[in-house]
Image (cartoon, helix red, strand yellow):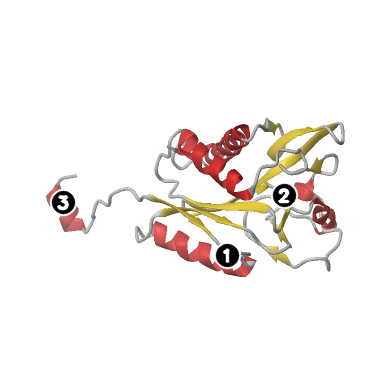
Amino acid sequence: MSAAAATETGAEARPPPGLEWRLAEGLTHYPEALAFMAARVAAIRAGAADELVWLVEHPPLYTAGTSARVADLNQPARFPTYATGRGGQWTYHGPGQRTAYVMLDLTRTHGRIRPRDVRSYVEGLEEWIIRALARLGVRGERREGRVGIWVADPAAGGEAKIAAIGVRVSRWVSWHGIALNVAPELGHFGGIVPCGVREHGVTSLAALGTGASMAEADAALRAAWPEVFG
């Protein structure tokens, strides 16, 4: 299309958005996080805001994805529960867990992530976590048929989940994201069947003995980002 035609139709080329990283201080209440994400997603779609990776911690709570089963909420009165609209099942959020909310315009290519391809985007989030964990001396792996990232669990003699993934895409802008267990109270996961998986437990960087702090986990996530998302 010529410049004249673009002017006549009211079309206006916009430069691609930048990427902002933002760290929330303290504990972010979940309804506030939902409201913030919804507003930011709308602004990204309108070309009025940069894309965002938002790092938060929440007070203890349970969230239900679109596939969550009531029977998998073992202790409904233990912590507040929220329906989210993201994919997946039940997830715990709480202090010591790094939740990273990722808001990207998926009509664009991001590194190895193909545009308008949700599967490619989820695979990108998985690879991002795996590469961040590697920087912390932990081998993270995918498992066929199970969402999230898994590690060997020497204490249990099997494997356990160290990071959850749950995304929502609204008119090709992503929100929600990942939750990496740095040093949460693992007993709090007992109120749900995490992500509907009964056969395997959950673990954390602390439980694996890495000694990694939240700041070190954040640094690993940030360093691994361009290797996947460009």
Quadrant in which residue 73 is drawn: bottom right
Give me the residue at 73% from left, 62% from top.
60
Left or right of residue 212: residue 74: right
The CA span between labels 1 and 2 is 24 Å
Disc with the residue nearer the chain's start (3 vs 2): 3
Quadrant in which residue 146 is drawn: top right
Tell me the amino acid under the disc marked 3.
Ala
> Residue placed farthest to the front in the image?
211
- Residue 162 image point, x, y percent: 71, 42
User: Which residue is labeled 1 in the image?
Assistant: 34
Secondary structure of the residue carrying numbered label 2: loop
The CA span between labels 3 and 2 is 56 Å
Give me the residue at 45% from left, 37% from top.
226
| Picture mark count | 3
| Foreground tag (1 vs 3) | 1
**Vertical arrangement, residue 127 with respect to residue 212, above or below:** above
| Foreground tag (1 vs 2) | 2
Q: Quadrant of the C terminus?
A: top left
Give me the residue at 60% from left, 39% from top.
129
Q: Residues within 10 Å of mark 1 (few under 14, many from 20)?
A: some
Secondary structure of the residue carrying numbered label 1: helix
Secondary structure of the residue carrying numbered label 3: helix
- Residue 152 image point, x, y percent: 77, 31
The CA span between labels 1 and 3 is 40 Å
Give me the residue at 68% from left, 50% from top.
88
**Vertical arrangement, residue 196 with respect to residue 79, above or below:** above
User: Which residue is labeled 3 in the image?
Assistant: 5
**Label annotation for residue 183:** 2
Tell me the amino acid under the disc marked 1.
Leu
Disc with the residue nearer the chain's start (1 vs 3): 3
